[in-house]
Image (spheres, rainbow, N blue to C red):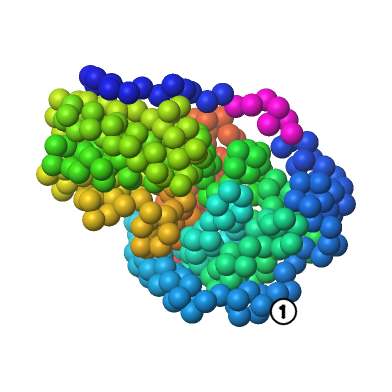
Amino acid sequence: MADYLKRAEQRSRQDSRDLVELVRTMIADVEKDGDDAVRRYARDLDGWHSSDFRVSDDEIASARRAMSSVFKDDFAFCKKQVTDFARRQRDSLSEFEAQFGDGITLGQKIIPVEAVGCYIPGGKYPLISAAIMSVATAAVAGVGHIVGAAPPREGKGIFPPTLYALAESGATEIYSIGGVQALAAMAFGCVGMRPVDMITGPGNAYVAEAKRQLFGLVGIDLPAGPTEILVIADDSADPALVATDLLGQAEHGPDSPAWLITTSPRLGREVIAEIERQLLTLPTAAIAGSAWKRWGEVAVVDDDDAAIALSDRYAPEHLEVLTRRNDYYLDNLKNYGSLFVGEESTVAYGDKGVGTNHTLPTGRAARYTGGLWVGKFLKTVTYQRLTPEASERIAPIIGRMCASEGMLAHEITATVRQQRYAQRRRGESGA
């Protein structure tokens, strides 16, 4: 049980029927009318009047020249951190071929997805680092064709740092196109794009709904809603630092939850007071304050195990642990997108380039999935090879299994092999 010092004013989200229907209509329009529909939506929604959506080499070169040496160095550091971690993940996966019974060879191959579309949002905050998380990680996986897409800003093309990030991360092609029309164009292959097999990237509610509706036609990284942070802290934590980290994520938008679970009622009260103090001077207080008012929660629990149990029920996207027993939490927590252990870590590090990926499950999806990683761009496929003797030996077993399910045509495929190889064996022995 938990004693809540603060509960969220808004406790649940209901999908907007209007939003769902609008996205469905847009996707159907793009499927039916192709380029014409994409151009119409780009003009009406993004103020894009050019007939060409693909970014030229000259535009990419111009963006490169416009970036400062400090930005380039910072970007290179973040990219190296993320790609080095992704390579280590890739190296942890292996192909194999082994004997599973006499004459039965089974194997596993790991094959990259052929074509991926990576969407980079460009609304209130252009998420430059998202290019590293998706494009660069796909490149490490060995994806052969990577389409990068980002919305134009004020009808003038992609935000130059985002364009630089897409190019440096390894995008094969880059398109200035945003929102639902971008995802639909990548899925159906419009405005010069090659149709992709998978779409990745964060975005607003419309982008998230488009990914949900396009899933099946293409793969997706994961459905991602408003970002979340949960902090577990005891009385050893600094209330001001806890408040800072909660507000750091709350500034994403007025629908971004920020939660605190603590074993110390005193700390809980001090964090609430500290948040109110920091909001007085925070540059993004209008957004962060609204998110905290509507979605913020502070829960007091009896002990560490109760904190773990409650956190696992929240299954947060980002989870920070600031306690005396950080290793105990690391060993026992089960449901989270990414874990930040100790006050030396913070969500911003993961968001921008410490090395782990920032595309993470929200809305309690961490109960059943992790976030985007190099393995999302890889297909683990299997194969089998049998000797005639092994095929003859297992055919009766498999045939009986087929018959028990009423799948008699399946049974025949096994029976004919049993008969064929038995006859061949008798012929070879001269019987």
Q: Nearer the viewer, residue 374 or 302?
A: 302
Residue at image point 47% right, 51% down = 359
Q: Which quadrant would residue 32 be assigned to in this image?
A: top right
394 shown above or below 231: below
**The magenta stretch spans residue 17:** yes
126 shown above or below 298: below
Residue at image point 35% right, 41% down = 278
Name the quadrant of the N terminus.
top left
Q: Position of residue 214 (x, y in %)?
A: 66, 43
Q: Position of residue 286 (x, y in %)?
A: 49, 38
85 shown above or below 395: below
**The magenta stretch spans residue 365:** no
Does residue 234 appear to the left or right of 108 in the view shown? left
Does residue 19 appear to the left or right of 263 in the view shown? right
Q: Position of residue 419 (x, y in %)?
A: 54, 51
Q: Nearer the viewer, residue 337 or 102?
A: 337
Q: Nearer the viewer, residue 105 or 304?
A: 304
Q: Which residues are magenta?
A: 15-22
- Majority secondary structure of the magenta segment? helix
Q: Is residue 55 visible?
A: yes
Q: Nearer the viewer, residue 86 or 179?
A: 179
Q: Position of residue 285 (x, y in %)?
A: 45, 40
Does residue 382 appear to the left or right of 148 in the view shown? left
Which residue lies under the disc numbered 1? 58
Task: In the displayed orientation, state which residue is furthest to the front.
Answer: 280
Q: Amino acid at mark 1?
A: Asp
